[in-house]
Amino acid sequence: MRVRVYRDAESVARVLAREIARCVNAGPALVLGLSTGRTPIPLYRELVTLHRAGRVDFSRASTFNLDEFAGLSCSDPRSYCAFMHRHFFDHVNLRRARIHMLDGAAKHAARECLRYERAIARAGGIDLQILGLGMNGHIGFNEPARALVAGTHPTRLRPASRRANAALFGHRVSAVPKAALSMGMATILHARRIVLIATGASKAGCVQRMIEGPVTPRMPASFLQLHRHAEVWLDRAAASRL
Ligand code: GLP
């Protein structure tokens, strides 16, 4: 894994936004994998700024988000879909038909996951996957477990992940859905290039285990060690235990 360390979270966002813009400008039909959570918010803000300044055109790009809460449709303001519209989609010129989200409210979750895998394949696979890092080492909603699932799948959320997502639900952990749909570990590892971002001292221990620890399903992000073009972009605080 290639590790890059920047002074602070804002610098990570600024440099990565410029790098994404460079990739989109070099290959306008770029397929981007996107993540939610607090970490990528400054990145989306920077991308919107670049777009407004005429420095990046998303009109031919496609996006696939990593995950969604079970039971929530895009019209629910607590959904990851609504989050993405608020922070990014509504402010750039991505074509609606090229924005892909898992439908948390789909009646048949397994069928929805299969549809998603096919849509990714039809788009030619993911060129650049942006990831955050869960406090318990999850990526997407691939939670620490005895074994990981390869493809996009319905999954149950661990208490730690429900706590980490409580802010979207009025800080009520009990209101956070117990299940989600998520890209699987193989779906993620098939991306041609992966950039995981982690910022803040609270992620330092997890970052250290992800990079220097063994590859284990107990730390799902450690599987990125197996990828040829995986990069970890950190601020100094998140890199403090390396
Ligand atoms: C959620 C998402 C993950 C994300 C993680 C980190 O649980 N499912 O894809 O990476 O949160 O969140 P944060 O950036 O808020 O720490």
Image (cartoon, rainbow, N blue to C red):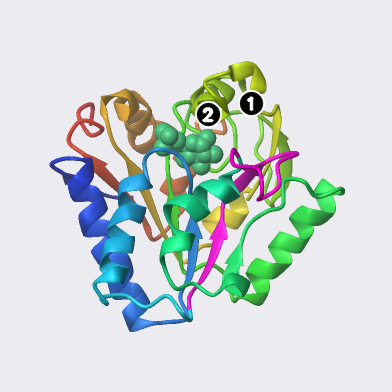
Q: Counting residues from the N terminus, which is met first, the one under dot 2 or under dot 1?
A: 2
Q: Using the image as rendered, state which of residue 75 and residue 125 is in the foreground.
A: 75
Against 69, residue 167 (above or below) is above
Q: Residue 79: horizontal and vertical position, in percent?
A: 61, 42
Distance from disc 2 to disc 1, alpha carbons, whole Å, reads: 7 Å
Residue that badge 1 annotates: 176
Whether residue 21 is in magenta: the answer is no
Residue at the right extreme, as displayed: 108
Q: Are marks 2 and 1 in contact (CB under 8 Å)?
A: yes
- Dividing the picture into quarters, in which one does residue 115 lie? bottom right
Label 1 element class: loop
The location of residue 136, given as percent across then percent down, is 48, 26
Residue labelled with disc 2: 165
Identify the main secondary structure in magenta.
loop
Mark 2 belongs to which amino acid? Asn
- As helix, strand or loop, the secondary structure at mark 2 comes to loop
Residue stretch rendered in magenta on the structure: 61-78
Instruction: Name the residue: 36% across, 40% down.
Output: 39
Residue nearest the viewer, comparing 151 with 67: 67
**Relative side of 110 to 5, left or right:** right
From where the camera sits, is residue 220 visible? no
Tell me the quarter of the image containing the C terminus: top left
Q: Residues within 10 Å of mark 1 (few under 14, many from 20)?
A: many
Tell me where residue 97 appears, x and y as whole percent.
Answer: 62, 73
> Left of 176 or right of it: where is 2?
left
Residue at horizontal 29 percent and vertical 27 percent from the top: 204
Could you tell me if residue 86 is visible in this image? yes
